[in-house]
Amino acid sequence: MAKLYFRYGAMNSGKSTALLQAAYNYEERGQHVLLAKPAIDTKGASQIESRLGMTREVDFLIGAEDDARALFQRERDRVRGEATAGLLPQEPADVACLLVDEAQFLTPEQVDDLFRIAVEDGIPVLAYGIRNDFLTHAFPGSARLLAIAHTLEELKTICRCGRKAVFNGRRVGDAFVFDGEQVAIDGAAVTYESLCGNCYLQESGGRLS
Ligand SMILES: [Zn+2]
């Protein structure tokens, strides 16, 4: 049975790099993969960008109101059609895997779509995302993924103090901030730093939410 995987980590834990590497591993074996991400992320528009400098176009963007399974099915049909028409290698003539970046921005319903793609359509889904926001609350997509993914895998990164980072501190300029929208829109001055629990509480003055 195909599974839904959630590979989560703090900011800067190399999620996009890991996703692109996973796609490469499939393709090295001659398999077809599909890449997607929510349309809410304006950082790279329709590209997946790794901090190491690799970029790649997604096959489809998932808008807030979209049926992710229907979008996947359309792309899957395209791959099958191209394989049949001889535009892609005939074998295998199907999609081996769906890779989703920035999965924290999916709606819970779209995460359910991913679950159905794995369980009912038989295609493994690898979702990559951030577990919690700058106020330590789960993103809606992440909360649903943590609840229903078959397999949870943590991508680890290190806090400035050397401990494992689990939180994402938001900075405006040099100062950490603990008020604001979950998703900072076009914040040129907004940056994030992955922090361990100790450093987060130190910066927040003991505030956890
Ligand atoms: Zn720390």
Image (cartoon, grey):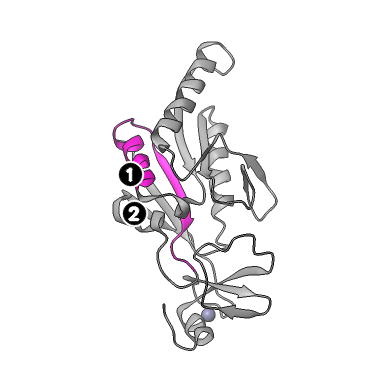
In this view, the residue in front, 140 or 4, is 140
**Is the CB atom of the residue marked by disc 1 within 8 angstroms of ligand 1's nearest atom?**
no
Q: Where is residue 136 shown, x and y percent of the image?
A: 43, 71
Q: Is residue 193 above or below residue 85?
A: below
Q: Amino acid at mark 1?
A: Asp
> Which label belongs to residue 112?
1
Q: Where is residue 150 shown, x and y percent of the image?
A: 31, 48
Residue 8 highlighted magenta (yes or no):
no
* Highlighted range, magenta: 109-133
Q: Around disc 2, counting alpha carbons within 10 Å, would you say few (fewer than 14), some (14 to 19), or many (20 or more)?
A: some
Residue sitting at x 42%, y 60%: 139
> Which label belongs to residue 144?
2
Q: Amino acid at mark 2?
A: Arg
Q: Are marks 2 and 1 in contact (CB under 8 Å)?
A: yes
Q: Where is residue 191 shown, x and y percent of the image?
A: 63, 68
Report the quarter where the C terminus lies.
bottom left
Residue sitting at x 63%, y 81%: 175
